[in-house]
Amino acid sequence: MVNCNPETVSTDYDTSDRLYFEPLTFEDVMNIVELEKPVGVIVQFGGQTPLNLAMRLHEAGVPIIGTSPESIDLAEDRKRFGKLIADLHIPQPINGTAVNVDEAKRVAASIGYPVLVRPSYVLGGRAMMIVYDETSLDQYMKTAVDASPEKPILIDRFLEDAFEVDVDALADGERCVIAGIQEHIEEAGIHSGDSSCVLPPYMVKQEHLDTMRKYTRILAKALNVKGLMNIQFAIKDDIVYVLEVNPRASRTVPFVSKATGVPCAKIASRVMTGQKLADFNLPEELDVVNFFVKEPVFPFVKFPGVDPVLGPEMRSTGEVMGMGESFGEAFAKACMGAGAMLPLEGTAFVSVNDSDKKNAVRVARRLSDLGFRIIATRGTAAVLLDAGVECERVYKVNEGRPNIVDFIKSDEIDLIVNTPLGKSSFYDERAIRRAAMQYSVVTFTTLTGASAAASAIEALQEQEKLSVISLQEHHA
């Protein structure tokens, strides 16, 4: 085991026979290879970093087992992958690449705003951004990254209001077993590591699930995957798009393994050494009993002054899992595990951007039906009152006193739903979210997250006592 992070579980002394704390650079790995003379090297379990090394190691004669470095490069190289997807007639968001500002403007104009811009071959969505106009694109290209022909900027059409789904699969070059289909609770545009997700999916149509299964099997064969792979899909206007394919284990593999009771990493390793999936008596898709919710854990409390709004750059530092007989119960347990105690009663503050106002009515009505008093800023309050939802109006920070931050500080707010409103009220929102963090008020910055919270509160109100069971008992 070669690992540059001493904090991880893989560095437990009884996990591997020999453990190297070394940086994951080409030179360091080559030194270890020369000393150990391995029969095979696995690069699938270290995320993006080892994949970026795979081709150089292969060219240096290192025996990489599992999915071949050529297939890894085919999935990672945006241009080659785009051509493969087009040849297979699988939809993907319109995209292009650019190495300078003028090229980026031309590509973005032909795609149409908003666009998602990011450097190629990066970790954790670093320097990834949703850009809504040419001025912001100009600024991004000047400050965020150094582009070059070897590492161009990737520009994708951003699918607004789309739902994202993660699929993990095991393949042996011939057969493909779907390990888990996980529906993201936050909409597309939030980094998958920062989004809560639920297994099995609870809101995706059956036809879309079947389409995803079909595309997963086609791509596993086309890329000749041996071991694990992860595909991110987005669903918008009844079309299933492929966002990206990772020919490696994703961060959701431990979650899927615990939920299904099947050790996916162990099976993938055996497949890489030549065994077939048929040897493990696995069904076409792994079965899940009950609901499992993965909830990210954020470090915001430790960084005073940081705005906790989520976006395409990953900000979470860990994750927890909740299991329940209903989605609401599982989400409630996951929130508890992440340190967010959902209130069962009290006052909920709702303030959302214009595009969210229509859907905010549904969330506010649910909270009102659950017994919450609703307060809202002027624009949101007008929409809620029009729709027949009882609510009281409260001042924004710059409108007068007592304003919403005063209410938070005097412990009168129990739950906050605040979706980002754009530059104009940026100051106001930051003040709200920072006060919420300082005074430990549970805050949701997406409507889908708030809706999931309403389901969780409902489950908590209905059940006097939550059942607790260990994974071992559950799978037994």
Image: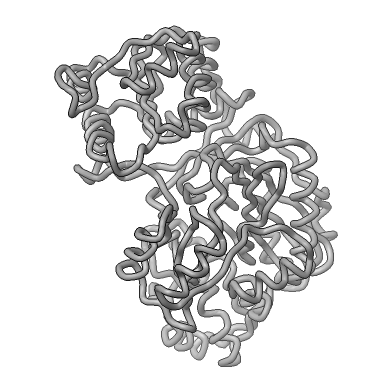
Q: Is residue 19 placed above or below 344 in the rendered structure?
A: below
Q: Residue 465, image x and y in percent? A: 51, 13
The C terminus, quarter of image: top right
Q: Residue at x 62, y 41 (%)?
A: 183
* Quadrant hosting residue 142: bottom left
Q: Is residue 465 placed above or below 288 in the rendered structure?
A: above
Q: Is residue 63 placed above or below 184 in the rendered structure?
A: below
Q: Residue 179, image x and y in percent? A: 71, 50
The residue lying toward the viewer, choosing from 54 and 393, is: 393
Q: Residue 148, image x and y in percent? A: 43, 82
Q: Residue 443, image x and y in percent? A: 36, 30
The answer to whether 220 appears left or right of 371 in the picture is right
The answer to whether 84 appears left or right of 102 in the picture is right
Q: Residue at x 26, y 17 (%)?
A: 394
Q: Residue at x 66, y 61 (%)?
A: 229
The answer to whether 234 appears left or right of 281 in the picture is left
The residue lying toward the viewer, choosing from 111 and 438, is: 111
Question: Residue most toward the left?
Answer: 401
Task: Report the colour scheme.
Answer: one colour
The residue lying toward the viewer, choosing from 221 and 261, is: 221
The answer to whether 376 appears left or right of 358 in the picture is left
Count of all numbered marks drawn on residues in the image: 0
